[in-house]
Amino acid sequence: MHTDLEHALVYFGCLVVAVILHEISHGVVALWFGDRTAKDAGRLTLNPVPHIDPVGSVVLPAMGALLGVPVIAWAKPVPVNPSRLHHPRRDMVFVSLAGPFTNFMLMAVAAYAAHVVYDPVTMPGRTVYDLPLGVQILYFFALVNLFLGIFNLLPIPPLDGSSLIERVLPHAWLPHWYRVRPYGMVLLFFLVLSTGVLTKLITPFENRLFDYVFR
């Protein structure tokens, strides 16, 4: 039975899993570079409970799934202590970019699987929601990972892309950057809720993903 609730649950489930794997990847790469903070905090686990943020992992994704609109979603940030890294300023770039990289890898795997499983002859349908549940899950898992990967590469604090700015800024400029950084979340909410910039940015990639899977 196809219902709006079923569609929302599929999207919500895919989004929460993708966000959690994004966070775990930060901790894994930090461990590779010498920082055991995430491991010692019990955050390198697939158990979702330690990662869930009530607002970012439940309320906002559920609202977005029910309303059919893109939202900001996050899990509890994995703790990282840059001072424990072998080369803190350099290694933090790899730690930060591990999240988007993981999302893009998950997107590629899910999109390929959906492409292989989908058969237009035996699975006719006017929309994605008319397709078998397994195909829906694979496609929406690819879609949410595409969204998270692109979104987190934006060079706005606290997103992962801002680590690239911190890496290239001269040391003398860093204090000014650190003063501006706390206001990044305000800018993010403005971009998501008011400007439509994210939708315009992501739509071409979403269309390419759809064409690859279903055409």
Image (cartoon, rainbow, N blue to C red):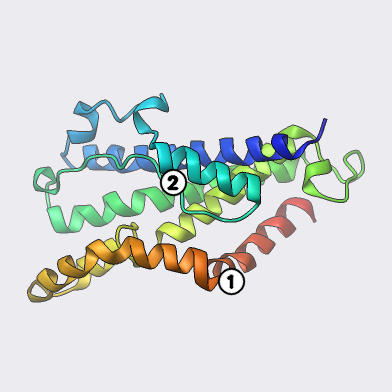
Name the one closer to the observer, 163 or 127: 127
User: Disc count in the image?
Assistant: 2
* Residue 18 x %, y %: 49, 41
Rendering coords of residue 93 (x, y %): 26, 57
**At 53% from the left edge and 55% from the top edge, which residue is drawn?**
147
Against 56, residue 39 (above or below) is: above
Of residue 41 and residue 84, the one placed in the foreground of this image is 41
Locate residue 68 relative to residue 59 in the image: left or right: right
Along the line of sight, the residue nearer the viewer: 204 or 34: 204
Q: Residues within 10 Å of mark 1 (few under 14, many from 20)?
A: few
C-alpha distance separating marks 2 and 1:
23 Å
Q: Quadrant of residue 135?
A: top right
The answer to whether residue 108 is seen in the rendering is no
Circle on res. 148: none
Task: Specify the quadrant that holds the N terminus.
Answer: top right
Would residue 143 appear left or right of 185 to someone viewing this image?
right
Q: What residue sits 38% from the left and 37% below the top?
A: 53
Residue at the image point whose x is 81% and y is 40% from the top: 131
- The answer to whether mark 2 and mark 1 are in CB contact below 8 A is no
Q: Is label 1 in a helix, a strand or a loop?
A: helix
Question: Which-is-in-front pick, marks 2 and 1?
Answer: 1
Locate residue 161, reporting x and y percent: 34, 62
Q: Is residue 24 visible?
A: yes
Q: Which residue is mark 1?
A: 200
Residue 203: x and y in percent read 63, 66
Secondary structure under tag 2 reads helix
Report the quarter where the C terminus lies. Answer: bottom right
Amino acid type of the residue that numbered disc 1 sits on in the rendered structure? Lys
* N-terminal label among 2 and 1: 2
Question: Which residue type does callout 2 highlight?
Answer: Thr
Disc 2 packing (10 Å; few <14; some 14–19; many ≥20): many
Tag 2 residue:
102
